[in-house]
Amino acid sequence: MVKSAIDIRIAEHAGFCFGVRRAIRLAQEALKKSKKEKICSIGPIIHNPQEVERFSRMGLEVVGEVDEISKGRVVLIPSHGISPQRQLDLEIKNIELIDTTCPYVKKAQEAAARLSKEGYQVVVVGQKEHPEVKALVEFAGGEGSIVVKDATEATGVPILSEKLGIIAQTTQSKANLNNAISALLERGFSEIKIENTICSDALNRQVAAKNLAEDSDIMLIIGGKESANTRRLFDICKRIKLDTYHIE
Ligand code: F3S
């Protein structure tokens, strides 16, 4: 019988990112400190169903809307953040909040609010349906701000102001952001300000995954199906290797 040796290698940067590890730690501490029935999170704290399920077995309830939360409960804000309006709604109800928003996401939220305050029309390069991006749009002031997923969508951005501010969803690839910026430069805005809000932890994973894919036959990308970070790694590797699979 001929035995074939399979060489299995793990990317230099793999596993939960800094922000997710931080959110898990804060949630664990909260569960230790408060009565379990008091604690809930507004949406899943991270986009990893297996970990969310583990927390659910520990007693962490996931609720969808502020209306569902009664006074006296302790609420975890997820690692990808919530909109300023949602935060305000929770504060008005006098609910104790534990904010697990990743500091990199916070930085992007602050950049969105700052650009808007300085009079820039804000473009967010990212996935429209992702909760982080939805919140970033609200931090940028809602109406005038627009989400584009790539350069093609960027070519259709209406000119509503002389000044354009650009930020990115934290898990975007540099290549996609660069292409979108190039397309926006063609649009005729007289001033463009770019805030690089791509997270360095996500970037390290993208570079490590690309390097490994270039030197492998099959790539397995293991992570939540709803995780923007994981999906980005899948997209990057898929472009290099046809044999790329995303599994949870
Ligand atoms: Fe993770 Fe925070 Fe970056 S959640 S991917 S370290 S933005």
Image: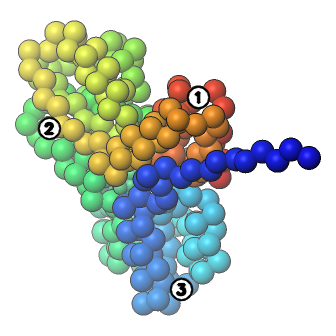
Q: Give whichever of 31, 2 is nearer the camera.
A: 2
Sequence-wise, which precedes: disc 3 or disc 2?
3
Q: Secondary structure at mark 3?
A: helix
Q: Amino acid at mark 3?
A: Lys
The verdict on label 1 being within 8 Å of ligand 1 is no
Q: Is residue 31 left or right of residue 176?
A: right
Q: Secondary structure at mark 2?
A: helix
* C-alpha separation, residue under disc 1 versus residue under disc 2: 39 Å
Mark number, residue 36: 3
Q: Residues within 10 Å of mark 2 (few under 14, many from 20)?
A: many
Q: Residues within 10 Å of mark 3 (few under 14, many from 20)?
A: some
The residue shown at (56%, 58%) is 48
Q: Residue 205, percent across and down?
A: 41, 47
Residue linked to disc 1? 241
Sequence-wise, which precedes: disc 3 or disc 1?
3
* C-alpha separation, residue under disc 3 versus residue under disc 2: 40 Å
Is 90 above or below relative to 218? below
Is 181 above or below relative to 186? below
The residue shown at (8%, 37%) is 118
Sequence-wise, which precedes: disc 1 or disc 2?
2
Q: Secondary structure at mark 1?
A: loop
Residue linked to disc 2? 115
Q: Amino acid at mark 1?
A: Lys
Q: Is residue 114 left or right of residue 108?
A: left
Q: Residue 144, percent across and down?
A: 25, 28
Q: Are marks 3 and 2 in contact (CB under 8 Å)?
A: no
Is 125 above or below relative to 228? above
Q: Residue 222, percent across and down?
A: 60, 50
Q: Is residue 156 left or right of residue 233?
A: left
Mark number, residue 110: none
